[in-house]
Each structure stands twice: as structure tokens, then as C-alpha cells.
Amino acid sequence: MESATALLERAETVQQPLVGGRSNEILGRIGNLETRLARNAREIAAAQAVRFQVFVEEMGAKVPPQAQAARRDIDAWDDICDHLLVLDTTLPGEAEDQIVGTYRLLRQEIAMAHGGFYSASEFEVADLVARHSDKRFMELGRSCVLPQYRTRRTVELLWQGNWAYALKHNIDAMFGCGSFPGTVPEEHALALSFLHHNASAKQGWHVRALPELYHQMDLMPAEAVNPKAALFALPPLIKGYLRLGAMIGDGAVVDRAFRTTDVLVVLPIASISGRYKNYYGQDAGRFAA
């Protein structure tokens, strides 16, 4: 894959078709907010700028000097992923000025053709995929929303987009890293222990952190975990995944560059709660434009 420097330089000068041959389709709309895939390199660059604002300026992540100078969070996977956007159409300017939230989507066939999944640098994802050779996987990553747009509507549109995309590409399972703030897993002993005791992936969906990065999650015995307090301590994104029917892999990983403690979230499509399938629509028609 290209270096971050090369990607930055190319994105400034090239407007090219994106992976998958996308159309201009709007995937969903609620009021002044709409969700769709990025259509060109300018919009991807704008999504990277939103990620920089959230991950670097707000959360203190460290990025390479070139990315810091460009004020964009960028890595080698950006060029092969689809970028789901939420836009506030009432904001002035072009579409790239209206992006308020983003998700990065990577289908299995694209990942395998370009060196693998992003989260394989932390978790034994290849083993998970190999055990389900009859299924199609999709990785979700780099989810972020600008502070003033962290509302139910924005989250609903992000999931509307994910669900519509998964249906379009016949995806059988989604996975991706869910993050806790900070690099000391013990500071999240309650929440991590709750996940270990109550949401561990089973029935062939188990996946472990890489041995050299593995941190125990069962930091408290099951009887010592207060479920209500633990749920309150969970990051909203992970809590949302659990509501959908997701499971959690074995072991946490400390990401020092992003200053987070990561767990792997696994969500087979068949496990998604019927309540949510009905809410968004079996054909993703709930918020369809």
C-alpha cells in the first residue's frame, strides 16, 4: 500500500472513481441530515478532516507529521475503503463542507486483494474469516461524529447507511474495533469484565487479540459486576453494537497512537435483533430517501 505521504499528495490532485463503482444514491434522510457514500477524493479528504478533528484534536491521537500538517487523519486503508458520510444539507458551501459524521467500510474481497483488514493488526481476524469461508465479511472502522451532531438522528442515519450497504453487497457479518478512552485497561475493569462475562463471542464467532498484544478482560469476577453500572460505563458505540446483537472477542488491545483500549466487535447479520431489522426495514427502507 502507498504511504500516508503519497496518499495525501494524490488526494490533493486526483479525482478518480472510487472502489466499487458507486452511484449518487442517497441511502437515507432524516430532516436536514442525509447519508450516502463519498463520491470523490475531495469528499474523502473532508471526511479525513472530520476524523482529525475528533481523533486528534478532541481525543489526542498521534498521527504522522504529514497528516498533522494537512490536518487530516489518513492511512493506507483509506484508498481501498468506501466512506459512509452523514451530511447536514443546511450548512453553507459544497458537499465536502457539510460532512458531520463518517464511517469507513471495507468489504472482504477488497481487503483480501489489498493486504487484509485493518483490525488484523490487533486481532486474529484471518482465523475468524477462515472458519466462515461460506460467508462474506465487512469491516467497520473510523466511526466518528462532530460533537454538536452526536444525536440519535445522526446515529440512526449511520446505521441506516451501514445496513443498506450490507444488504446491497450481500454481507453476512460485520466486525470492527470498539474503543475505550485511554491506554490502561484496568481503568475500564467494570465494563471490560461485563463484556467478557456477558457478551463473549461463541459458536464459531470467537476471535482473540494477537498474543503479543493481548490484555485480559476478566478483571473482575462475574458476581462482582453490577450490570447497570457496567452498561453505563460502556462507550455509546459499543453499547449500540450490543443492542443490535453483537458479540465481543477475547482480549483487549492497547492502541497507543490513538490512546485507546480496543475490543473486537463481531456482528453476524443473522444475530441482528428483529426489532432493529424491523425498525430500519428488511430492505433498509425506513429512512430511504
Image (cartoon, grey):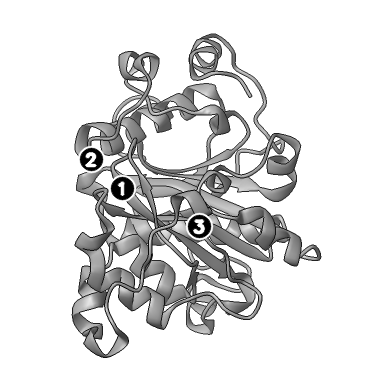
Circle 2 sits on which residue?
A: 59
Mark 1 vs mark 2, foreground winner is 1
Q: Give the number of the disc on residue 220.
A: none
User: What is the quadrant of the N terminus in the image?
Assistant: top right
Q: Residue furthest right?
A: 134
Expressed as whole percent of the image width and height from the top left, the position of residue 175 reads 55, 59
Q: Secondary structure at mark 1?
A: strand
Residue that carries the numbered disc 1 in the rendered image: 260
- Residue 246, position as x, y percentages in the image: 49, 72
The amino acid type, in three-letter code, at marker 2 is: Met
Judged from the image, the secondary structure of the residue bearing numbered disc 3 is loop
Residue 177 in picture, x, y percent from top left: 45, 54
What's the residue type where badge 3 is placed?
A: Ala
Residue 39 showing in the rendered view: no
Q: Mark 3 against mark 2, which lies toward the viewer?
A: 3
Amino acid type, mark 1 = Thr
Q: Residue furthest front?
A: 212
**Dividing the picture into quarters, in which one does residue 218 lie?**
bottom left
Marks 1 and 2: CB-CB under 8 Å? Answer: yes
- Label 3 sits on residue: 209
In the image, is 206 to the left or to the right of 238?
A: right
Of the pair 161 and 240, the residue shown nearer to us: 240
Viewer can see residue 52: yes
Report how far apart the C-alphas of labels 3 and 1 lie in the structure.
15 Å
SS of the residue at dot 2? loop
First-in-chain label (3 vs 1): 3
Label 3 vs label 1, nearer the camera? 3
